[in-house]
């Protein structure tokens, strides 16, 4: 029996990526919609064969408790709503797949972990890049030491924000600007690929004076993460440049480059190494499988088999701690030290 999921919030990521991805899933299916726009909800319900009675308003969210066909929720709301809707889902006895960033503060992340733990329900953060086949192939190459000792990770994740009224530019809703929305991918990739946790961060933020988009949140953020082995991640993220998504991972024996990286589709991975005394650059193929489908099916399998998820709440909490340290560093112009948490990740 496939895991029935309620889709909470029918915005761009839910409608354009996740719902189509569900159609290719083997272990999950959408069975309910939660939305403030009933007409939109009914239209999508017809498209995905969801009964009209399973289209709920946000005010009816707690009624999910009485809908046994809904075993889990997928939360695709503005960031400030993630904590509340996760806690209420756990109380209703549902497993939770929550969008990134997990929440707007480490305190909220802890509440979410506690609520799901108490209810005995899974909490997974939708770090889709960790399910993307090329990123996973690269993770395996690193583990097999094909790049040699890892030394540097350089990454950019940027885009140009249009609408100055967008919720992503309001601090209370988004929690911050480019950093929690897209810079987060660089932090998560540096941790995921290296398997290490940073012990020091240094950060800087910038907003162009007079640019009305950035009255409340930062336009850009530049940061450095230092890991115990000496591995260094140097990253930039901006809301005011043409879309740019890439990273270069430099090892002692080889480098790997993804450009684009972090994209929904069409990521590309190249690796350079020395073969018979000559540098050889090769494109790595992993088959273009939909990373959203892989992520949803992983979550559903973990629910069905009561297994630990690969990207649990602790993973989101750790990124939140790092982002808070980056902001503190930007404020104080000092390096901020971070304690390494006991455990942050599920099985690879
Ligand atoms: P969106 O603005 O397109 O959708 C947000 C949804 O929330 C809309 O349906 C909106 O009606 C609803 N909503 C309910 N209350 C609201 C309120 N008070 N203000 C504004 N909207 C409200 O946003 P999105 O791009 O779909 O992002 C949703 C979440 O998904 C965010 O947390 C975002 O970070 C995350 N996201 C993740 C990825 C990914 O690749 N994993 C990509 C995009 C977005």
Image: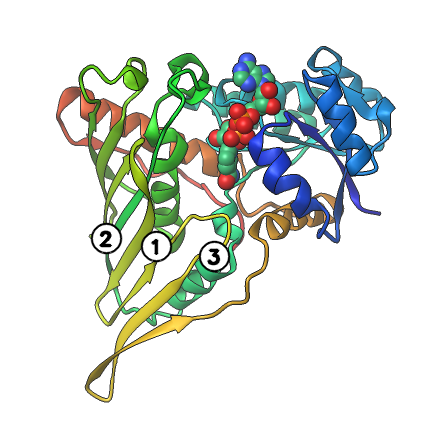
Q: Check the image and report above or below for 298 versus 138.
A: above
Left or right relative to 260: residue 235:
left
Real-space Cα separation, disc 1 to disc 3, in angstroms: 23 Å
Point out which mark residue 231 bears.
2
Q: Which residue is at 72% across, 29% downward?
A: 94
Circle 1 packing at 10 Å, graded few (<14), some (14-19), many (20+), is: many
Point out which mark residue 246 bears.
none
Q: Are marks 1 and 2 in contact (CB under 8 Å)?
A: yes
| Residue 223 in sight in this render | yes
Q: Which residue is at 79% across, 31% downward?
A: 45
- Badge 1 is on which residue? 194
Return the residue found at the far top. Answer: 59
The answer to whether the residue bearing label 2 lies less than 8 angstroms from the nearest atom of ligand 1 is no
| Residue 103, percent from left and from top | 47, 24
| Residue 35, percent from left and from top | 69, 20
Element under label 2?
A: loop
Which of labels 2 and 3 is toward the front?
3
| Residue 82, percent from left and from top | 55, 23
Element under label 3?
A: loop
- Badge 3 is on which residue? 266
Return the residue found at the far left. Answer: 333
Left or right relative to 292: residue 285:
left
Q: Earlier in the sequence, mark 1 or mark 2?
A: 1
| Residue 32 in sight in this render | no
Where is residue 306, by image quadrant?
Answer: top right
Q: Check the image and report above or below for 121 versus 234.
A: above
Q: Which residue is at 40% across, 31% downward?
A: 181
Ligand 1 quadrant assignment: top right
């Amino acid at each position: 029996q496939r895991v029935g999921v309620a889709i909470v919030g029918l915005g761009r990521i839910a409608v354009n990526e996740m719902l189509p991805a569900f159609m290719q899933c083997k272990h999950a299916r959408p069975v309910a919609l939660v939305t403030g726009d009933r007409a939109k909800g009914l239209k999508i319900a017809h498209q995905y064969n969801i009964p009209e009675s399973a289209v709920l308003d946000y005010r009816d969210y707690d009624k999910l408790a009485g809908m046994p066909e809904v075993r889990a929720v997928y939360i695709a709301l503005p960031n400030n709503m993630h904590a509340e809707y996760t806690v209420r889902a756990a109380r209703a006895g549902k497993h939770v797949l929550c969008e990134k960033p997990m929440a707007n503060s480490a305190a909220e992340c802890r509440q979410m972990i506690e609520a799901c733990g108490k209810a005995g329900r899974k909490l997974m953060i939708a770090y889709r890049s960790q399910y993307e086949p090329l990123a996973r192939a690269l993770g395996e190459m690193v583990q097999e030491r094909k790049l040699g000792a890892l030394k540097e990770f350089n990454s950019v994740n940027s885009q140009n924000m249009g609408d100055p009224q967008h919720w992503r530019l309001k601090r209370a809703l988004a929690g911050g600007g480019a950093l929690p929305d897209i810079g987060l991918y660089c932090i998560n990739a540096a941790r995921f690929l290296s398997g290490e946790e940073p012990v020091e961060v240094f950060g800087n933020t910038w907003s162009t004076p007079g640019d009305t988009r950035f009255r409340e949140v930062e336009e850009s953020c530049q940061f450095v993460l230092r890991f115990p082995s000496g591995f260094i991640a140097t990253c930039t993220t901006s809301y005011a440049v043409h879309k740019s998504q890439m990273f270069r991972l430099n090892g002692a024996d080889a480098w790997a480059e993804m450009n684009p990286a972090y994209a929904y589709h069409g990521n590309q991975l190249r690796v350079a190494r020395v073969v018979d005394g000559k540098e050889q650059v090769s494109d790595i193929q992993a088959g273009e499988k939909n990373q959203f489908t892989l992520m949803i099916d992983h979550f559903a399998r973990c629910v069905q088999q009561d297994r630990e998820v690969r990207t649990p709440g602790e993973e989101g909490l750790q990124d939140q701690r790092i982002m808070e340290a980056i902001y503190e560093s930007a404020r104080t112009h000092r390096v901020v030290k971070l304690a390494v948490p006991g455990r942050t990740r599920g099985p690879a």
